[in-house]
Image (tube, rainbow, N blue to C red):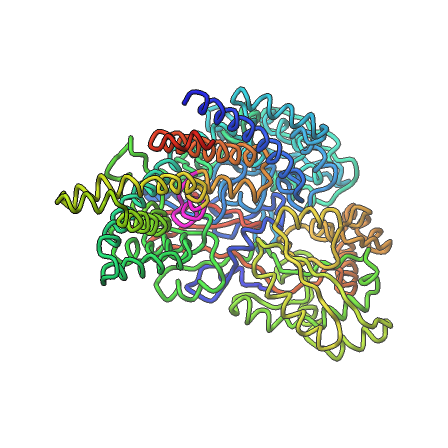
Amino acid sequence: MGAYVRRRFAGLVIVVFVASVIVFSLVRVLPGDPAVTILGQDATEEQLEAVRTSLGLDEPITTQYWLWISRAATGDFGYSYATGYPVVELIANRVPATLHLVVAGLLLATVLGVSSGIIAALNRGKLVDKVINAMNMATLGVPSFSLGLVLLMVFGLSLNWLPMSGYVSLWDDPVDAITHLILPAGTLGILIMPQLSWLVRDGMLANLEQDHVRTATSMGLPRSVIVRSNLLRNAFSPVLTLLGLTTGKLLAGAVIMESVFSWPGLGSLALRSVLSDDYPTVQAVVLLAVVTVVVVNLLTDLLHAKLDPRVMKGD
Amino acid sequence: MSDSGNDLSRTARQPFSRRRFLSGAALVGGTLAVSPFMLAGCSDDASEGPAEMVELITGAQLGDFTTFDPYFVLAFDRLQHFQIYDPLVRIGAEQGTYSPCLATAWTMAPDGLSLTLTLREDVKFHSGASMAAADVVANIERARDTTVGHTLSGGAAVIKGVSAVDAKTVRIEYNRPIPEGVALDLMASLFIIEPAAVPNVKTSPSGTGPYKFVSFKPGEQLKLEANPNYWQPGLPKTKTIIIKTFTDASSMVLNLKGKEVDWVLGLDYNQVDALAREGFTVRQETSLGGYWTLLLNVRRPVFSDKRVRQAISFALDREKVVKAVFANQATATSTPFYSKSLAVYQAADVNRYAFNLDRAKSLLESAGVTNLQFEAMWLSSLPQAGPILEILQADLAKIGVKVDIKTFPAAQGQERYTKADFDCFLSALAVPARDPNYVYTLPPMLPTAANRLGYVDPRYQQLATAAASELDSSKRQTMYGQLRDILVDEQIVVPIASRPVLYAFQSSVSGFDSAVGDLAILSGLSKTK
């Protein structure tokens, strides 16, 4: 297990380094000039040059990379071109909101997806199975943006049950925080729930035909025990993999949810930074997203290996 | 061009595009002034407000704030400057008159080489320190500093030196004679920052304005609180102002309807009528004098012939654009100057290039142009631009001209523009009611080799340079009239329609005002329970 962990960790470091080079290069290769974004298209060349110099953009690109990565290694990601705030401060202010949103969305998706998958599998071919399948299909077909707006109109505007925008920290006011969280996290959760539901259903159905399940059934074990011990445990492995892979999708989905619900998270920060050519913030946010996805996948793999040691042999 | 500046508050009709606000295309450049209401409020005898202040008013804008440094006045930064800072002089939005603000009086030397400003007594910065002449001098010196790279340095280049005559008097000297309007335009753009706050002004501003900066959470909200030492009696009328920022217009309007915010800035043209029907007050601002325009790159052979440019202008069905794209909320125009502008407006120019495909075709034939083909660029941040170009494309196709429409993200498109790497660019310009010198030397008309459209006309250059130093007002009018005629004739800049700004308010909110350049004034903002 130790060697496996070391190998995976070394891979993580390489991935993050390569990602840093790609991210840094991409934002500079792409068309756009931060000085023009800051001053507007009608600024004179002298004004633009003054801004470029003040931002260090007149240095060779290798020098710029070295300065950035060496400072980043110490946790200093520089200052936002757009706002003048330290990037670390901008990110630190946004992380809690995104964590609230993603974790709540993931929890909701897991609860809804796993339970509906179990119900569908246990009622294979029956009406309830078809209804769950149809709902999953419908959910997948709805653009996340539209779903968010519809829920906003129904539960926020028409019924006036829930707040329509903004973020409140769980630590400041748990009740208010949850009411603010329901719509965005609910929308996010609903969007990734169908895949989980189908995966659990298919995993359970595949195991239903296995000898150990038939044996357990013939021994007269209660259905709940068979589901928990024989079906779910085996079906959970691919679900775990999916949850790991879903991290990236959740972060991407958060960009849209944050826009609809005016949620001050990393997604909206990334969007704004990209649109404003805010190189330091784009680089830091993307790098953070890369590290998050890689770390979550590493943890998923380790958990996978713990549940099924055969995984390590194949690595 | 729209001239409804005296009819700013209404419950429908007038438009604006929230995306034009999103665009960032028009660098407003610190243009300010106020409507008659605020002009009165700016004077010493302003009436006392209600004894009881409103606790909290929450607004919203589409797009985030970028900086609190008032020397950088960009598209998303129109809501904060007049709250935190005051300028030395204010410009009347319609009349083009200048009124006292932090400067109570001024004297322009007869030779146009110096301006003496008398500063208001008892003005305090948010820190509690009194404002003195030395503070104003420090601000003007910063405006002259080209290394800061801000948007005022171009206008301030005419300043030769500045000094404090005494604690309340400032004298500015110029390196050439300039008319009073040119001098005061700059003073009206100059929001006074507390010198001690300059190093951190981007994120922690301090001025003399009606509201003090409390906090800003990027992507979330700006919080301001009333300045208890504000020099205007009875203002501000609200204790706390919160301005939330949204990235989605639909979501923002839903928040207005759900009463989570009291007012919003950044409506789509097609939202106006629906909101008005639902009882919201929709307010149009025309003080910007902005308009949608095609910018034609004269460096490209395709547009080097004036007749080709005029043909494009005649092929542009402005009425159809106004109807189909702006939901009848804008005004079609062929002139970049609106009626109340000081820029020697001429009503006959409005329909000078009325839609006429036959005329367009004959102009192309007379220019000997066949199989004309060009690329038209627009920014995705200005979503109305695409449909406008599609209308032009369809009409030009009828006379054998092929238009290749290309869209770019704002950053990419603006970079192409600054590098003059385009044939035709659909953009949005701001031409506020200011001294004609400002209007006739806007970047697309800039009479120098730095003109990004490649338009360098010796006639225009000579006239614009002479007019900038002409002190005789009647001679200036004549000169600017000639410049106007050149611009309208040359069609380097092809105006399409006006570009008003829209706000929507809950019916309980009142007292909002704005200055030339779309700069909001919230000091009189109030709300009934």
Q: Nearer the viewer, residue A296 or B342?
A: A296
Q: Position of residue B189 (x, y in %)?
A: 61, 41
Q: How many marks?
A: 0
Q: Is residue A255 magenta?
A: yes
Q: Nearer the viewer, residue B331 or B20?
A: B20
Q: Position of residue B210 (x, y in %)?
A: 45, 37
Q: Is residue B38 above or below residue A278?
A: below
Horizontal side of B71 relative to A178 (left or right) equals right
Q: Position of residue A19 (x, y in %)?
A: 57, 33
The picture quadrant where one finds residue A172 is: top left
Q: Is residue B80 above or below residue A13?
A: below
Horizontal side of B345 relative to B133 (left or right) equals right
Horizontal side of B244 relative to A218 (left or right) equals right
In the displayed image of the protein, which residue is found farthest to the bottom?
A: B358
Q: Is residue B513 above or below residue B162?
A: below
Q: Is residue B522 magenta?
A: no
Instruction: Give the residues in magenta.
Output: A253-265
Q: Quadrant of the N terminus of chain A?
A: top left
Chief SS of the magenta region: helix
Horizontal side of A150 relative to B126 (left or right) equals left
Q: Can residue A89 be spotted in the picture?
A: yes
Q: Position of residue B228 (x, y in %)?
A: 39, 32
Q: Can residue A164 be spotted in the picture?
A: no
